[in-house]
Amino acid sequence: MIVLGIESSCDETSAAVVRDDHLLSNIIASQEVHREFGGVVPELASRAHARHIVPIVKQALRQANVTINEIDGIAVTYGPGLVGSLLVGLNFAKALAFTHSIPFVGVNHIEGHIWANFIDVSEPQPPFIALIISGGHTQLVIVEAWGTYRTIGKTKDDAAGEAFDKVAKMMNLGYPGGPVIDRMAKNANSQFVRFPRAMMTDGNYDFSFSGLKTAVLYYLREHGPENHQADVVASFQAALSDVLIEKTIQAAKAHRLSSIVLAGGVACNSYIRNNFQVRATDEKLNVYLPKPILCTDNAAMIARAGLLKLNQGEVSGYDLAPKPSLRL
Ligand code: KG4
Ligand code: ZN
């Protein structure tokens, strides 16, 4: 089955084509317009999606070397995300499905992130545990079977990516903050400041990062924002990483699951990737990491998630509306 995926939930317009679990193309247009504002401006995001959506879909088809008539199904993100952004992709997908009589299916963006792990890869099989760490979400999910999810923990305040972005903003490092901090921290001292590791021993799988963010803010106020910048961001990254890794490992062990999959933009982070591997190996657990390009928002993951749904006979109606607060 050949599936066209469309993603426009936040600030990337993306279209991708998969043939079964093989990736044929994955085109992503990032919106540079938000950089000068230090975060996504919803109104500008919608307009950029409107400009990009048709050329991006055309390019994805061209690169996959397929025509629209060869597409068996269309998968599109319908939430969570910014309503104006979601509307652009969803309505375009519906129009394309309608005019070419192709079945289409709405995909939950968070579920899509998990499926980034199963593009050109077939391991692990459920049950396994998924840690979704993105700009908008931080969530621990047990994938009990394909398409069956049980959330066992999530953030009480900031998402992991949001914490990276806010710390970078405090230090004037630019947006998005994650990639900048990742790079700056590479040769720095991650033990320079001992920032708090919140809720590590609470016996649940929820997260909280606003205290860590505030601790960094107080540190900067006391010591000045220019001093030891790389060591400070490395120390912040280490604190956040420790909490993510230890909580996920505790959850995996408590639920007797030996496989952990990571997903979402923060799963690009090299420190988190390396340390997850090391700690999991200590605990005799397996960690699976999508390629970095599939961790951040993309349509390949939406196409892959949609493929499963379409294969299971799920099709959406033309009355499907965007759901900005959709949960998993
Ligand atoms: O999954 P994603 O592309 O979009 C959402 O669904 O939110 O995640 C974007 C987030 C941003 O907060 C960005 O700073 C973070 O992922 N991010 C990273 C890295 N690359 C992107 N965080 C840490 N290290 C990175 N290398
Ligand atoms: Zn995302």
Image: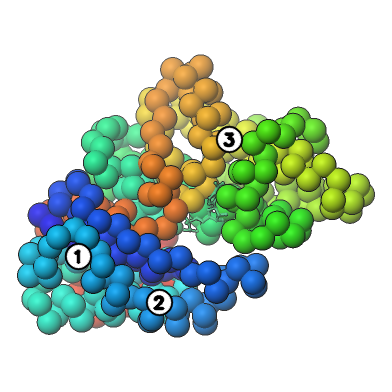
Determine contact: label 1, label 3, CB under 8 Å.
Answer: no
**Coordinates of residue 3 in the picture (x, y in percent):** 17, 59
Q: Earlier in the sequence, mark 1 or mark 2?
A: 2
**Coordinates of residue 95 in the picture (x, y in percent):** 20, 81
Rate crowding at label 1 as few (under 14), some (14 to 19) or many (20 or more) other CA atoms within 10 Å: some
Compute the Cα span from label 1 to label 3: 36 Å
- Let me know if residue 119 appears in the view: yes
Task: Identify the residue at horizontal 10%, vertical 54% (top origin).
Answer: 1
Residue, disc 1: 62
Beta carbon of the mark 3 residue lies under 8 A of ligand 1? yes
Residue, disc 2: 49
Rate crowding at label 2 as few (under 14), some (14 to 19) or many (20 or more) other CA atoms within 10 Å: many
Between 172 and 207, the residue placed more toward the observer is 172
Q: Secondary structure at mark 3?
A: helix
Task: Identify the residue at horizontal 52%, vertical 47% (top origin).
Answer: 266
In the image, 323: left or right of 95? Answer: right
Residue flagged by tag 1: what amino acid is it?
Arg
Residue flagged by tag 3: what amino acid is it?
Tyr
Determine contact: label 1, label 2, CB under 8 Å.
Answer: no
User: Which label belongs to residue 271?
Assistant: 3
Residue flagged by tag 2: what amino acid is it?
His
Relative to residue 206, is residue 125 depicted above or below? above
Between 45 and 160, the residue placed more toward the observer is 45
Q: Secondary structure at mark 1?
A: helix
**Coordinates of residue 124 in the picture (x, y in percent):** 29, 32
Compute the Cα span from label 1 to label 2: 19 Å
Q: Quadrant of residue 71?
A: bottom left
